[in-house]
Image (cartoon, grey):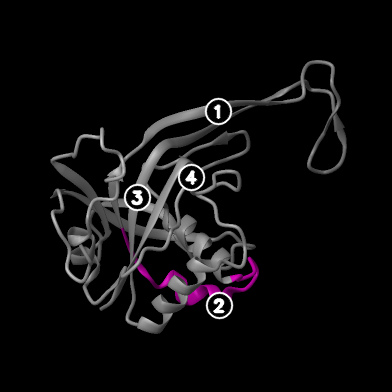
Amino acid sequence: MPTLLIKLAGPMQSWGTTSRFDQRDTGKEPSKSGVIGLLAAAQGIDRENWDELKPLTRLAMGVRHDRPGVPKYDYQTAGCAGDSIIKANGEPSTAGGVVSQRFYLADAVFLVGLESKSRDLLIAVDSALRNPKWPLSLGRRSYVPSEPMFMENALLDLPLREALLRWPWLSTERKWEEQPGKLLLSLESNDGSGTLKMDQPLSSYAERRFGARYVYSEWIEFPQEALNVPA
């Protein structure tokens, strides 16, 4: 089956799946719900439109950690002692300031693979990433990508794992950066093995229902060259 590869690079990325209230988490790699939401934004799919979103949720996804990034967090406050803060229901609250910790990955670069039986779907996704209808972000609206997500000749007639194994390392622009001996690769499991992740969209993003999927990880050799990729 064909695979489309995209690049997620930016100074700040956040891929949380368990965030609640004033604690905003991030995983160590892009979540499937986050990536599908990104593709939906590129195509201009409304958050209440499940019919158009559903084909994207059927994509098989894999992630290669070309630069894992550094976990960090922002210390944010809203209001302070003595201030009157408006709550979500519109009523004032005098409980004092609200402290929020928002975790993110600094300086990370991921190679994300999307596999589908439908080559036309992958072509449509690639076209949308080149000319997105809505702004694209890396997990949070303010976390904008530092480089285009699309790559030339990145729609490969290779299965997902093979495409991620063969594509050249993405961090070559930094001449001072030492090449790692191995890279971490995460793939969806078909036999229920691996780590359970609750980030499989089951409905429109307006309903916010997510199901389970299993992901296993492995270390792969550093890629030296790729098929179907110009030198």
Cα–Cα span, label 4 and label 1: 14 Å
Q: Position of residue 117 (x, y in %)?
A: 32, 81
Marked residue nearer the N-terminal end (1 or 2): 2
Left/right of residue 100 with respect to residue 98 in the rendered view: left
Q: Which mark sits nearer the N-terminus, 3 or 1?
A: 1
The picture quadrant where one finds residue 131 is bottom right
- Which residue corresponds to mark 4? 16
Q: Which residue is tagged 2?
A: 52
Q: What residue type is labelled 1?
A: Asp
Q: How crowded is mark 4: few (under 14 residues within 10 Å), some or many (20 or more)?
A: many
Is 55 situated left or right of 195 in this image?
A: right
> Residue at image x 58%, y 59%?
208
Q: What residue type is labelled 2?
A: Glu
Residue 57 falls inside the magenta stretch = yes
At which x and y percent is residue 202?
50, 67
Q: Which of marks 2 and 4 is nearer the N terminus?
A: 4
* Residue 104 seen in this snapshot: yes
Residue under pointer 3:
110
User: Residue 134: which quarter of the image?
Assistant: bottom right
Tell me the CA gap for discs 3 and 2.
26 Å
Q: Which mark is residue 74?
A: 1
Q: Residue at x 58, y 74 (%)?
A: 50
Q: Residue 201: x, y in percent?
A: 49, 64
Kindly identify the residue that appears in the image at 28 percent across and 46 percent down: 66
At x 64%, y 62%, the residue is 206
Which segment is the magenta one? 44-62
Looking at the image, which is closer to me, 211 or 98? 98
Q: How far apart are marks 3 and 1 (CA)?
A: 22 Å
